[in-house]
Amino acid sequence: MQNFPDCIAHVLAAEGGLVNDPKDPGGVTKFGISQRSYPALDIRALTLDDAKAIYQRDYWTPIQGEALPAGIDLLVLDHAVNAGPIRAVRMLQGLLGVPEDGLMGPITLDAVASAEPESLIASYSELRLDFYSDLPTWRHFGAGWTRRVMRARRAALALARAQAPLAA
């Protein structure tokens, strides 16, 4: 979980606090945790620590964030929060040309490890924008999603570059 604190800080900064936008199909949302996704949870009473635990359990663990390279972990987590872990992993698998089963397994992890990080970050970010632009709520949320993807891309590049080995 070496990058979980950095990745979750990015997600939480993008998600903000309590929101109840009538155009958001997720309903009442706090720290990005929606009533639609967690109908039994009292969203208004959700604490920041509770939200981090949910993100770790339901998003970080399924995408195997701890096994992903720096930067890629942030992008996949950020997209998983918006679109679900299975969709986020499938998108990555499609870019890598591996079977798209939505599960982060050894084949996907090997392909990620062999990929050039900056190119993968750019391609994944573009594919996210394509995904969002096809949603019926794009007119209302598109500008915000675009800003979020671009911030995630910049943060992912910074993480990847910070972890890159020095050239000999």
Image (cartoon, grey):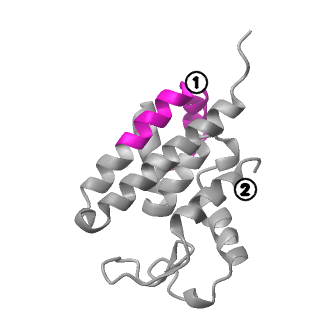
Number of residue marks? 2
First to last magenta residue range: 103-126
Percent x, y for residue 154?
A: 52, 42
* Pair 2/1: label in front: 2
Q: Position of residue 110 (x, y in %)?
A: 60, 30
| Mark 2 or mark 1: whose residue is earlier in sequence | 2
In the image: residue 96, left or right of residue 62: left
Where residue 114 is drawn, which disc sits there? 1
- Residue 100 visible in the picture: no
**Quarter of the figure that contains the C terminus:** top right
For image coordinates 57% across by 89% down, the residue present is: 44
Residue 45 counted in the magenta span: no
- Amino acid at pointer 2: Pro
Residue that mark 2 sits on? 5
Q: Nearer the viewer, residue 155 or 122?
A: 155
Where, by quadrant of the figure, is residue 72 drawn? top right
> What secondary structure is the magenta-colored segment mainly?
helix
Percent of width and height locating residue 149: 43, 50
Residue 88 shows in this picture: yes
Residue flagged by tag 1: what amino acid is it? Ser
Q: Tell me: 112 left or right of 51.
A: left
The correct choice, above or below, for 97 with respect to 23 in the image is above
Mark 2–mark 1 distance (CA, rounded to whole Å): 25 Å
Which residue corresponds to the image point at 45% horizontal and 32% vertical from the top-left? 96
User: Would you place residue 8 above or below residue 71 in this image?
Assistant: below
Q: Nearer the viewer, residue 13 or 126?
A: 13
Q: Tell which residue pokes out farthest to the top in this image.
A: 168
